[in-house]
């Protein structure tokens, strides 16, 4: 992580754009270099991935902000985030039905606007580390990689309020009521089909095939 941070700060710089392929070329033989990059975000580094309105191509990333200088041992210890234990993470995932509470996508489900890319779930802070968030289940929610990044304390929205209101007014009354409930609860409510679908996605491939055939046979 420290070597990656040095490369990003010295060779990419704030505002610079890079690709995962270029990052891997810089660190040949290093396993899970993508995860080391994500670890930097917990130290206040902001690294944006391609999404609507980002101005990035599919495989590009932008170093928006250099956070804690993790190559300095004292600064790294001072900026150390609250570590979320595996037990707490699983508690959060189980409570939230193994799906993002914001967009509703389930673990392993393909994004509609990103063919071939599937959702990875993370336990995201309700209040960011920078605002005193704790590594407890009550202060965490399940979020996909994009929703979690979109609500970080310094990440901008890509639509302004007027644009969002125009889209909201374009909904029918029933959908507006559902939207209002979702805004009030700050999460997407799901029906029984969604709940079974999420559980299905957690099964090994062989077991998913068995369940799918059983449902098809029942029809």
Image: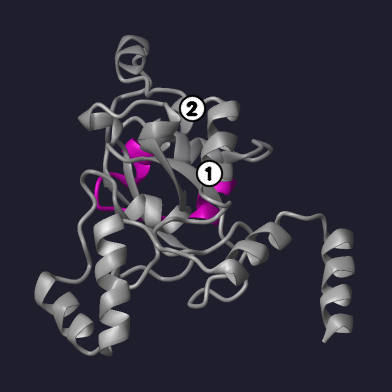
Secondary structure, mark 2, is: loop
Classify 28 as above or below 61.
above
Q: CA distance from mark 2 to mark 1?
A: 16 Å
Image coordinates of residue 58 in percent, x first then y, are 46, 70
Q: Residue furthest top?
A: 74
| Image-quadrant location for residue 201 | bottom right
Query: Residue, x 64% and y 40% (percent of image)?
Result: 28
Asked whether, in this view, residue 89 is left or right of residue 31, the answer is left
* Residue beneath disc 1: 95
Query: How many discs mark residues in the rendered view?
Result: 2
Q: Quadrant of the C terminus?
A: bottom right
| Image-quadrant location for residue 17 | bottom left
Query: Which of the pair 97/204 is nearer the observer?
Result: 97
* Residue beneath disc 2: 84
Query: Residue, x 27% and y 33% (percent of image)?
Result: 67
Query: Residue, x 12% and y 71% (percent of image)?
Result: 161
Query: Which of the pair 23/129 is nearer the observer?
Result: 129
Q: What stretch of residues is rendered in magenta?
A: 8-26
């Amino acid at each position: 992580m420290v070597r990656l941070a040095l490369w990003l700060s010295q060779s990419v710089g704030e505002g610079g754009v890079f690709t995962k392929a270029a990052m891997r070329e810089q660190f040949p033989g290093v396993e899970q270099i993508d995860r080391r990059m994500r670890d930097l975000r917990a130290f206040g580094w902001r690294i944006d991935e391609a999404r609507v309105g980002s101005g990035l191509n599919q495989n590009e990333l932008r170093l928006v902000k250099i956070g804690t200088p993790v190559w300095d041992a004292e600064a790294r210890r001072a900026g150390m985030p609250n570590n979320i234990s595996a037990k707490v993470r699983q508690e959060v995932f189980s409570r939230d039905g193994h799906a993002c509470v914001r967009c509703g996508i389930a673990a392993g489900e393909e994004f509609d606007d990103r063919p071939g890319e599937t959702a990875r779930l993370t336990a995201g802070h309700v209040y960011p580390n920078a605002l005193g968030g704790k590594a407890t289940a009550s202060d965490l929610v399940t979020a996909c990689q994009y929703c979690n990044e979109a609500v970080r304390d310094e990440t901008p929205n890509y639509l302004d309020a007027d644009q969002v209101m125009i889209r909201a007014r374009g909904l029918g009354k029933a959908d507006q009521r559902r939207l209002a409930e979702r805004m009030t609860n700050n999460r997407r409510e799901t029906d029984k089909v969604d709940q079974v679908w999420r559980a299905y996605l957690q099964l090994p491939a062989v077991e998913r095939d068995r369940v799918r055939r059983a449902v098809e046979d029942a029809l």
